[in-house]
Structure formats: structure tokens, C-alpha cells
Amino acid sequence: MILLDGFAVANERNLALKQLTDEHLRKGERLPKLAIILIGDNPASLSYVKGKGKACAVAGILHELHHLPEDTKQENVAALIETLNQDSTVDGMILQLPIPRHLDEEVLINLIKKEKDADGFHVINQGNLYQKRPTIEPATPKGIMTLLAHYDIKISGLNAVIVGRSNIVGFPVARLLMDQGATITVCHRQTKDLGFHTRQADLLVVASGKPHLVTKDMVKEGAIVVDVGVNRVDGKLIGDVDFDEVKDICSYITPVPKGVGPMTINALLENTYKLYLSHSKEA
Ligand code: NAP
């Protein structure tokens, strides 16, 4: 079994970004900047935001955190997004999810200018993805594809099974894998006999948010397993795949933590840099 070491690969790529941003600095140009909007004090979100800030520092990308109280009104978040949309020093912007329930996530995400949508969640950017047009790819699917490519895993012809169909992980990762020639099955809560489908997978991507949903008996020998899930159970972070059992029968597997998580952050930074380059061209 080969561990898909997202932590090491992401770090290497963040350092490569640093070389690029250093070069802009040497030329007297401004640095890319990511604005992060965090609403409330969800401990997992606080920790993700901290990780994003740290990675920005490694990559030479500026970041600013806008931390708003839990009871912030929709119009106040909208006003902040509009200010950041107008701020020419901000290249990328993200709204850290989940947001409090009284706020309309879909509306707020789509208020972020698509040219600053570093997470690739804007409806136009997602539409472009589904029509195979140039776009900003959603960070987690992009990070997964980058990780597979780093290990030289050929996607074409594989039976890929994805557990989860969310707009930010399952559905777009299915699209990206299909574009690279995989044959796709997407499973969800209405899927009958999940194990039947997962056992057909040469490549299994699990993004259900259900701790240890996938056990050894649900995985084909030699499969490539990508575990997107992050679940805190008894103070420990665990994935949607029972890593200890499954690692012995698969060919490749991502750990949790230090698998898909750091790759997602790296993809976010690479998206921010891409947006920065397009803004610099326009200036
Ligand atoms: P989500 O929006 O809650 O979607 C979960 C998906 O899994 C849904 O499509 C759901 O089906 C499906 N599902 C849930 N239980 C299932 C079951 N028992 N059998 C089959 N399908 C099932 O979650 P998400 O935002 O996609 O995130 C998924 C997980 O990835 C979470 O643990 C999240 O924390 C993690 N995540 C990690 C990263 C990272 O960087 N590592 C990034 C994003 C998300 P229905 O559609 O039928 O409800």
C-alpha cells in the first residue's frame, strides 16, 4: 500500500508557489491576497481558517481574516462581500462553511464576484466546470485530482465510485474524474446496497461525512481509496473510511488527517494565485 501523502505534496506545492510570489516581490509587484470571511466560532472552522492562514504564509500569499459574530445579519455579510469585491488588493475571497443557519449560504456565495471566487463555488464557475470551459475549480476536487496526478495514477478507464453528491465535493469530483476518462458511479443516501457499488471501484472517493462508513468488506482488493471525510470522534480526527482495516487491501490510500485536507488548502492558494495573475493582467 502506498500512502497518498497530501501533507507532503501540498507543502511542496506551497513552497513552489512561494518561489513564484517571491519573484513578483523582487519585481516590485504587489503580492496576491486572500480574504477569509468567518462567521461565528465553530471550532472546526477556526482550525481550518488557522491552517489556511499558515499555508498562505508558506506560499507568500497575503491573507486577511474577517471574523464576524455568530448573529451577524445577512445584509452585513453581504455588505462586507461587496466591499471586498471592490477592493483591488483582494484577489480571492472565501466564505468559511458552514455558516450559521439564519444566513442564506447560496445567496452569499453567489455575491462573491466570480473573478474572486477562490473556492470555485460560484454558480457560473460551477457551470463552466460542468461545460468543460476554463474556470476556477472547486478546491477539494482540484486538490484530489492534483494528488492523484502527483502519484502518476492514470484515471482513464478506471471504474470510479464516489460516495457523496454535494456541490462542493462529490458532484464536481465526479465531473473531473469523468473528464479524465473514468467511468463514474455516484452514491448517496438513497443508494441501495452501498457496498455492492463500492466493491466495483478501482478508484473510491468517499465524501459522506459519516465516520468509518466504508469498511474493509466494501473495498475491492487493490483499489485506490481517497477519503475526504473529516469527523471528530472522541477528540480524534477520523475519516469516512476505516483506515486501519482498509489500508491492508488497497493499493493507495489517503490518511485522515494529512491527506485531502492540505491538498484542499493548496488548491485554494493555487486558485488565489491564478485569480491574482488574471487581475494583474487586467491592471
Ligand atoms: P455533505 O454536503 O453533507 O454531503 C454528504 C454526501 O454524502 C451527501 O450527498 C449524502 O447523500 C452522502 N451520504 C451521507 N451519508 C451517506 C450514506 N450513509 N451512504 C451514502 N451516501 C451518504 O458533505 P460535503 O460537504 O460533501 O463533505 C463530506 C465530508 O467531507 C465531510 O466530512 C466534510 O467535513 C469533508 N470535507 C473535507 C474537506 C477536506 O478538505 N478534507 C473538504 C470538504 C469537505 P444525500 O445527497 O442523499 O444527502
Image (tube, rainbow, N blue to C red):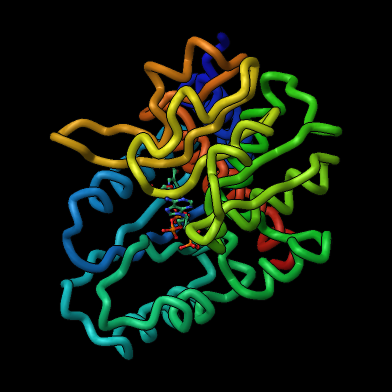
Q: Residue at x 21, y 81 (%)?
A: 72
- Residue 255: quadrant of the picture: top left
Which percent across, then down, holds residue 257? 36, 29
Q: Is residue 155 left or right of residue 125?
A: right
Q: Nearer the viewer, residue 119 or 132?
A: 132
- Quadrant that contains the N terminus: top right
Kindly tell me whether residue 169 is visible in this rendering: no
Q: How far across and down, in percent of the image, does residue 163 sit?
A: 55, 47
Where does the image place residue 216, in percent across and percent down from the top left? 47, 23
- Between residues 129 and 180, which one lies in front from this camera angle? 180
- From the viewer's perspective, tell me whether residue 41 is left or right of residue 89: left
Q: Position of residue 6 (x, y in %)?
A: 50, 26
Q: Is residue 202 above or below residue 221?
A: below
Q: Quadrant of the C terminus?
A: bottom right
The answer to which image quadrant residue 232 occupies is top left
Q: Is residue 216 visible?
A: yes
Residue under the point 42% across and 77% down? 81
